[in-house]
Amino acid sequence: MEPVLSSNTTIKTQAADLPAFEDHQKQETHFTTCYMCACRCGIKVTTEGDEIRFIQGNPNHPINKGVLCAKGNSGIMKQVSPAKLRSPMLRKPGSERGAGEFEEISWDQAIDMLSKRLGHIRATDPNKLAFFTGRDQMQALTGFWASQFGTLNWAAHGGFCSVNMAAAGLYTMGHAFWEFGDPDWENTKYFMMWGVAEDHASNPIKIGLKKIKERGAKFVAINPVRTGYQAIADEWIAVRPGTDGMLALSMIHVLLENELIDQEFLVRYTNAPQLVIDTPGEQGDGLFLRDDEGNAQVWDQHSNAFTSANRADIAPALFGEYQAPDGRKLRTAFSLLVEKYLVDDYAPEAAAKVCGVDAKSIERLALEMAHVAFQETIELDIEWTDWAGRKQDKFIGRPVSMHAMRGISAHSNGFQTCRAIHLLQVLLGTIDCPGGHLAKPPFPKHIPPGIKPAKHSAPNTPLSSPPLGFPTCPEDLAIDDDGNPLRIDKAYSWDAPIAAHGLMHMVISNAVKGDPYEIDTLMLFMANMAWNSSMNTANTMDMLTAKKEDGEYKIPFIVNVDAFHSEMVNFSDLVLPDTTYLERYDTISLLDRPISDPEAACDSIRQPILKPDRDVRAWQEVLIDLANRLDFPAFKNEQGENIYSGYKDFIINHERAPGIGFLAGWRGENGDQHLRGAPNPKQWEKYIENECFFKYELEPSQRFYRHANRDYLELAQYAGWVGSTDQIVIEVYSEPLQKFRLAGQGLYDGPMPSDPQHKERLSTLFDPLPFYYQPLEQQRIELEEYDYRAVTQRPMFMYHSWDSQNAWLRQISSQNYLYMNTAEALRRGISDLSWVWLESHNGKIRAQVKHMDGVESKTVWTWNAIAKAPGAWGLKKNANESTDAFLLNHLISELLPEDASFADITNSDPITGQAAWYDLCVKITPCASTEMGSWPNFDELACPPNQAESPETLNYTSHENVNIKRSMRDVFTKGAVAKKNKGRGQS
Amino acid sequence: MKLGLVIDLDTCVGCHACATACKQWNTSGTIGPLSDQDAYGRDPNGSWLNRIRTFEVNEGGSGCSDAPLDLHAMATDTASKTVHMPMSCMQCENADCVTVCPTGASYKREEDGIVLIDQDKCMGCNLCAWACPYGARELDESQGVMKKCTLCVDRIYDEALPEAERQPACVLSCPTSSRVFGDFDDPNSKVSQLVVERAGQPLMPELGYAPTNQYLPPRAQAEVPQAAKKASATVAKLKQWANQIIAR
């Protein structure tokens, strides 16, 4: 036998005496898609009977190329978790919500009860259903279901996760960080990572970092904490939390001062040359000068005249002041930009005081990137056709790339900060070019994507557009004639006008207050709102059980859909048990959050590998069943019969537009059409045949400059990814933001806010050019008292997972600590492993300190979501997760600290409504020596009636082991070691 | 043949994928099961064959500044450096764990140098674990026998597996490809070449166990020149910027 080694040479060996370890005849292998987090890697699962032998990465899969992370490798422990829900359950009549007293009911009873209740809501006031989903990966389905139901009140968890990243990207360049873009790992020579402990693309980032490290490209990590990725960076920049915007804009200051910008890129691909009306204090100020057809105008240096910015045959002036035919003063967007950032406020010396990065480093980083962008330019000799139909003979690459995530997004200045980072990329010309930041199909989209949020709902009527979309002006808001929010989370209201992912973190708080109105049913899927997914956790539990004077719950009915006994289960009235990821059909669709690569459009499926051993149903199936029972129009034919027999049938046959469905591969009656084509009855089989994924590779000519690449845009239009082949003009200057600013200033010809707080926020924070402002919480508290910034990270082995209870992963960490800078802690007399009180404006907790040098001196941080309520997740009540681990959530309010002159308002980014988790400021005091263990503590949650006791010991195996016997001869001769040891003098 | 691992400390991000991949494969492997005590209770702790240690290396700080691998000198910056260090059996040439075994259960294979434990002969006396300076052996409390890395001997020779998969589970899984498996006796093997190219080092060689596994130290920090600055008198102010003729 020959082992295959990681080398080109094969070594012969005599290992014939080895036994057969595995009975492969008893094993089966199947492909599917992992769901241990949001990365969605391809996996190959080997089973033996009902047991899993091994889960490994699929080497052919575009996402993970064979590798798998710590979570993916722990899928077995998810499958055997004792916390799996076993049957539908109803809160016992007469018992209190939160007490966890349930009775098992049948699926028939559960669906019957739910569909009657929902049917009544739908027939009267559909908005009385609030349907919010957590870590779901089927928002295209749940969103479609909600719009067929007719409720505005649907969103997933993006509002407390990453909407600042998605929105800032989509309102600037039509794609984004997050899942809509990737660094060009193959070509980049300089990679800057902002605020990333881990991300959705966990394996692709790791695969990419390996490539750039091997190539000797420089990797700069900007993060207050040096864990994970930062540990292997060439340079770690310890920025203060919430000040990255200042750092980025100061680098822009350096680039502008030294004229180190890509003027050709700005003229060809952005709105920098477009003429802005410069009439402060008047209506129309800050908007683009437009002709009668609505085309933005530029000054053409060939004809010395105003002309449409969309023309190809012009040489627009990037700088200058002009006078419009009607006499109004005009300046190019770029002139405004240069003036804004060349002021001393953004000079490195001033920025250093804000962000804590020394001035010399700020300047050096900017000049290093400029060197790589302009002196180490890549040229790929590939012919392509630009947006205007002109043949180009090469792609020019400026090989500086970036990635940014939650350290940017989870601040109340995150939208503007993320725009500042994108602006830095644009000035260097690094957008969708070789070595730069690449879009992933179906992105880029036109800016912003053309979907407007729905705002009208009516009984028994689907919404006319999806519940979530992209407003471009105050007219697009979901508010009534008096300016009041139409959605329960107040998304698309003056509180958060561009709340493109909703504000899930406000739903419970608002519903309990009846502000803007009361709801009837809250339906949650994979969302642990009674614990780590809520700000202000202890108060949220109180809200979930709050009653009106008549004894009715303020939220009358709570439905929870989950596969496990999370904390939220006990605060629910009806519990619907979901399957695990290995037990169901599923789609990861291009209509949703796709798994594409920059050079290929991809989607994938899950297929059942194991049969459930309990009375559970896949939520996808239940949604289709409910849609049929509730007579959703899209689910009925003209005779009123159900069109779809179930989820698989729906996925095959439902067309969003002619020829376009949830799965893009193997369409057409014969399965020979891709991206677009008639439904294929054998589509699932084709996916399974092809290892459960579909990959449509772009031609080399379609892989870069896709915002202005006709070859690509024509394909994108054919595939339904974009509505037209018009150039996607990158918006360094955001006119939509200026429209909201004008509304705040009282200068908008349309809806305007009346509340002084809204007016102030809109007029000061909705700047069409990104700027730095202090996070909002910090503006309202005494920073001298609350003198540390507190942030969380999720460890790589639990990031975005549902698996804190996983018996293997919890052995890596079952307690989180409060990490504090060693020197700072010693200065404060706080010793390693001592307990401290952490206090914010909202509350107080007790936590155990660990010293660490790699953390910014006035920042403390911890791993998020390790703490658990006693009794939940199948853990014993004395598990470390409940006695010593802690949630920072208790300290974070869903509302900004009170300000006497203003009404209460959400603790979120004022533009997008992104939950401002990382704005938290705390004070730290040592505990008395008798004070140990985390605090606050909670009563033990009762277990579901049919949940078996968790085992003390696990001895998991899929078959009896086959031992390798050492021969007696080898024992007597003392084998290889004795020979080697000869003369070493050891026995 | 001298089989072992090269582990690249320059790119290990401490994600623990190798640890759980190992646990997963081997709990149903030749030395399985790998039991877990208090799996859902307090201080859960099971048998693992590969664990990731994380150190901070810094000047006078809390890190392991006297570690034989002079990681501090390798880190070219003055700030602290976080190093993730996966540790499993080093497949030592002078394996005291083998020589101390009173039952002959522990042995080192002549064919390929893999140190194994005959599970039928082991009586769980723990002597070998005391003899191992790397903490690589763990007594399985439920099974009553010693467990250690087998280099996935039940994968690497299994011809029923696709060729490319006949590697230890940790190597297959590592998302940053920081683990490489091969024959150190072969100077042309990838592992041998990496050790030469990247100055690979064994861990604590001064103890004399002659470990086979090698660690690649962090690379020197990438250096990037800076673009030229303008002379301070000509630093750009808006009025000085002239329009260029750039066709759209």
Image: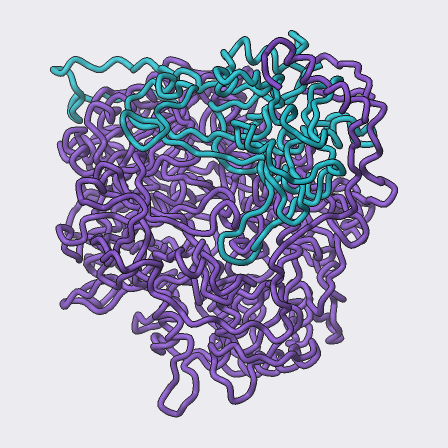
Q: Is residue A657 visible?
A: no
Left or right side of A461 for A497: left
Say which residue appears at 29% left-offset and 23% top-offset: A365
Q: Considering the image in quadrants, where does the C terminus of chain B appear?
A: top left
Q: Nearer the viewer, residue B56 or A428?
A: B56
Q: Nearer the viewer, residue A368 or A268?
A: A368
Q: Is residue A112 visible?
A: yes
Say which residue appears at 50% left-offset and 16% top-offset: B205
Left or right side of A242 for A583: right
Left or right side of A604 for A265: left
- Say which quarter of the image contains residue A931: bottom left
With respect to residue A882, does A670 lie above or below? above
- Give how far across and how far down residue A981 sits, in percent: 63, 13
* Colour of chain B as rendered: cyan
Q: Nearer the viewer, residue A327 or A698?
A: A698
- Give how far across and how far down residue B170 sits, in percent: 62, 32
Left or right side of A964 for B43: left
- Give how far across and how far down residue A456 sits, in percent: 46, 70
Q: Nearer the viewer, residue A635 or A216?
A: A216
Say which residue appears at 58% left-offset and 20% top-offset: B213
* Colour of chain A as rendered: purple
- Give how far across and how far down residue A900 sits, in percent: 14, 68
With respect to residue B247, does A555 lie above or below? below
- Say which quarter of the image contains residue A295: top left
Say which residue appears at 50% left-offset and 18% top-offset: B207
